[in-house]
Image (spheres, helix red, strand yellow):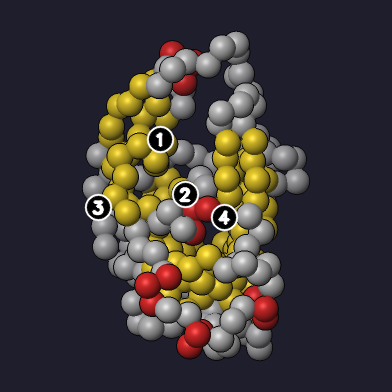
Amino acid sequence: MFMSGTIVLLSFQACNGIFSDIYDQPSPETENEYGFILVDESSHTGRIYIDATKYTEWHYIDLHEKLVTTEPIDSKAPEKWDFAVHRYDTKTNGGTVWESSVSDFHSLPNLTTLPSESFIGDEWTTDRITIDMSQMMDGIILYAEDYYNPCLSRWLDVDTSTMPPIYTLSGKVYLLRLPDGSYAALRLVNFMNDAAIKGFMTIDYMYPVTL
């Protein structure tokens, strides 16, 4: 599934004051190991670390092959992927997502007890996928039209009603039901690196889930 990243120009009321350092940019000397950095085959668990600091990229994650492919936001998605991350936003490749009330993979309920209607699919958006914040103080933000998953994207709440924004991790486990009938459990552990630069995403996963 791929939809073109058409750019949309939207305006909003300019903020009072100057907040040039609110939306952190990566330091050029920052060096980290990215991708599937921890994998435990015996428990089907691991950790994914992504540099999602750029607003102009999607990071496509293939849980089957344990690969992360980064593409410009207006480029075609890779042939195989399961979910993707843009900054804090997410989308799936034909999947659906359920938000649990637990923070531990092994506390999830039995999969057979979950009603299908409780899983949420992707939605089309024209004002969610931010690609340019450079004119924010002039009341202008550039967005891309694309699908995103409103359920999985709740793993981090960004409250922009105050300045600076307030970031709140849900800490919850999200179940991703893939088109092949398998399930993945995902939990966003952190959205910053050791230098407190925002956009570095640490994701714990279990795949496949066999509860």
Mark closer to the chain start, 1 or 2: 2
Q: Nearer the viewer, mark 1 or mark 2?
A: 2
Return the disc, 4 or 3, that comes first in the chain's sequence.
3
Residue with the mark numbered 2 = 89
Helix, strand or loop for disc 4: helix
First in residue order: circle 2 vs circle 3: 3
- In percent of width and height, residue 168 lies at 65, 45
Mark number displayed over residue 131: 1
Separation (CA) of disc 1 from disc 4: 20 Å
Identified at 40% across, 35% down, the residue is 131
- Is residue 92 at all visible to an observer of this figure? yes
- How busy is the neighbourhood of tag 1: few (under 14 within 10 Å), some, or many (20 plus)? many
Cα distance, mark 2 to mark 4? 9 Å
Q: Amino acid at mark 1?
A: Ile
Which of 154 and 192 lies nearest the eye of the viewer? 154
Name the residue type under label 4.
Answer: Trp
Residue, far top: 17
Residue 18 vs 142, above or below: the answer is above
